[in-house]
Image: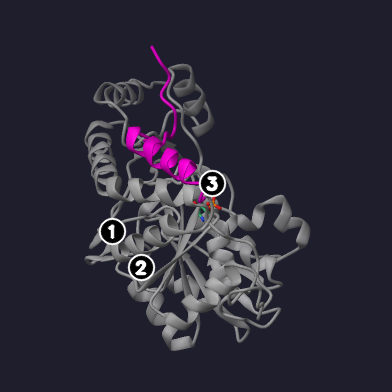
Amino acid sequence: MSSIPIARPSIGEEEIRAVEAVLRSGMLVQGEAVARFEDEFSAYIGSGAGVAVSNGTVALDLALKGLSLEPGSEVITPAFTFIATANVALYQGLRPRFADVDPRTFNIDPEDLAERITPRTKAVIGVHLYGQPFDLDAVSEICEDRGLHLIEDCAQAHGAELNGKKVGSYATGCFSFYPTKNMTTGEGGMITTDDPELGIRLRLLRNHGDLGKYNHVVLGYNYRMTNIQGALGLVQLKRLEKFIRQREKNAQALDQGLKVEGITTPYKAPGARHVYNQYVVRVEEEFPFGREELMARLQKAGIATAVHYPKPVYEQPLYRELGLDRGVSCPVAEEVSARVMSLPVYPDLGSDDLSRIIQTMNEMEA
Ligand SMILES: *Cc1c(COP(=O)(O)O)cnc(C)c1O
């Protein structure tokens, strides 16, 4: 019986041929394939323009940099996310601050966010965690009222929608194409924006501030994407809707199949299209034993699981050491980080794999 991994990218012959064609062309870096990928991806999202970069962290970094905030300004992110969301504030001498999350969606809690705004707060980075949109209506309204910039961390949410509109088209969207995400280019990232001026600035920052012919007008970076990644992205984008439908189907099978006391299956917010980058259950108090024991037993049965994420960002050793946001408390983030467990949900998961996961879970006893 083979083991079921927690995630696996779906790479076919077409991806292999596309990469081979780039290699044979000799045009390896940022060129036609990247430009086409930017156009097709931003059109899919419903955003005016796409700026392709080398990874998702860099997408967030540039999107924040593009705001030209004064050093020391505060940027609020949810306390419960991948560390990159908050780290990009540190990269630029800004202060990450943390808001608590909703216990059902695991996404930023708008009421708590509003309470954490200070006169120094200049931006909010919301995260569509696990592929479920955060409350964009409420968060956008707060940002508008208080004059804050909004960035969407869409690293896990390609194709996710709220009320029929795709995430990444509400504000500045930042995507990742890391192999565990819903589509991959190996490493890779994209920023989506409707603001043409921001688009120009991001392109300059991406390429050493070069206006062309070694005319460097601002301090930029090398954050470019290769044509190898661009060609992979074009093929994966064509397959994305199919990947998402397969993830939705797998999630539905798990929702319906899992019947264990003390396991709470994912909640879907009204109006949301959840694209299930992760299928995350809560292991509740009533479950006969602890999460770590459950994970160990599943591992023994050949089923990989993971915890996304085991502690709030402010409890990470780096943040503790920096003494940042000392005394902050996000009780829901602390509670859910102790309860969540991700099960495999990737598109190529077979129905026999799904049955095995469901049966193994349902037969768990103290
Ligand atoms: C993956 C991820 C990132 C970073 O993307 P990379 O491409 O790995 O740099 C940022 N935020 C979230 C929520 C992510 O899941």
Q: Nearer the viewer, residue 123 or 56?
A: 56
Q: Residues within 10 Å of mark 3 (few under 14, many from 20)?
A: some
**Looking at the image, which residue sits at the far top?**
1
The magenta stretch spans residue 341:
no
- Residue 260 locus on image (x, y percent): 31, 31
Asked if the stretch drawn in magenta spans residue 6, the answer is yes
The residue drawn where x is 70% and y is 79% is: 71
Q: Amino acid at mark 3?
A: Tyr
Give the mark nearest the N terminus, 1 or 3: 1
Disc 1 and disc 2 in contact, CB within 8 angstroms: yes
Check contact, mark 1 vs mark 3: CB within 8 A: no
Residue 277 image position (x, y, % from top left)? 38, 46
Question: Looking at the image, can residue 78 be seen?
Answer: no
Q: How is the image coloured?
A: one colour
The label number, if any, that marks residue 269 in the structure image:
1
Write the start and end of the magenta stretch as one range: 1-27
Image disc number at residue 105 = none
Viewed as shown, does residue 96 lie left or right of 32?
Answer: right
Label 2 crowd bin: few (<14), some (14–19), many (20+), radius 10 Å: some
